[in-house]
Amino acid sequence: MFFVTKTPWWNAKTKPQTRISSIPARELHYYYREEGDEKRGMVMVYADAPSMNYWKFFVKNKSHQKAEINQDERLIEQYLKYLTPHPASIDPKERKAQAQAITCFGIRDWGKEPFEAGCYVWKPEILVDQSIAALASFGLADSISLRNIHICGEAYSDFQEFIKGRLRSALTVLKQIN
Ligand SMILES: Cc1cc2nc3c(=O)[nH]c(=O)nc-3n(C[C@H](O)[C@H](O)[C@H](O)COP(=O)(O)OP(=O)(O)OC[C@H]3O[C@@H](n4cnc5c(N)ncnc54)[C@H](O)[C@@H]3O)c2cc1C
């Protein structure tokens, strides 16, 4: 999800995850810019299990090719509830002003068709250890003995879907580089 507002309480120095404990989400990222006297702020909200279960009811379309922009206005209510400076004590006038300051908002659910999420997995019957070793260092056809091509990354690791996989894969490859 994202919200763009003309009255952000955050600025360019606001760190990711600020106030994450007050919203059902895994990650919050803030963006800020000034143009003359005008301010613009965007907050991006990322949710996966379990917090995505809170947000999935705000996605309208069954097939979901792209983000739904400015569709379900109940999302603005959620912004007011979780992402305004003092949600518990906001007075009606301020509430209205904060809602009107939102210039754009949207939501995207990567778990819906046609993408239905995505992650890397080795094909059945692939010998993972051997494949990782082969990819860590090999040569091209005209210089096979040189072994100067190295492939690493979470996609080619023994711990797919996680940063740990990427790190493990990088360490394996680094050991092959002279
Ligand atoms: C939404 C989401 C949430 C996640 N949450 C978690 C989590 O909570 N915990 C966790 O451990 N992991 C999580 N992951 C997984 C984690 O982000 C990945 O495992 C990790 O980023 C993989 O690192 P990588 O370096 O292998 O690949 P990437 O991070 O994908 O890096 C590959 C880089 O190569 C660049 N690139 C691609 N093609 C080219 C090209 N032709 N030329 C030059 N550059 C190119 C790309 O731009 C990218 O910067 C999450 C992933 C996603 C998508």
Image: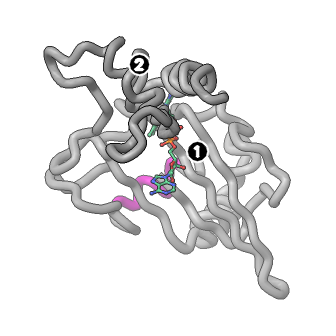
Q: Residues within 10 Å of mark 2 (few under 14, many from 20)?
A: some
Per the rendering, the mark at residue 81 is 1
Tag count in the figure? Answer: 2
Question: Marks 1/2: CA distance?
Answer: 51 Å
Q: Quadrant of residue 119?
A: top left
Residue 160, x across and y down, in percent: 39, 23
- Among the 4 quarters of the image, the one containing residue 36: bottom right
Query: SS for tag 2?
Result: helix
Pick the front one: 157 or 102: 157
The residue under label 2 is 133
Mark yes or no: residue 50 visible: no
The magenta segment is 72-78
Vertical side of 110 occupied by 11: above or below: below
Specify few, some or many for label 1: CA neighbours under 10 Å numbering under 14, 14-19, or 20 or more: some
Residue 64 visible in the picture: yes
Determine whether the residue tagged by mark 1 lies in a helix, strand or loop. Answer: helix
Up-down: is 69 above or below 60?
below
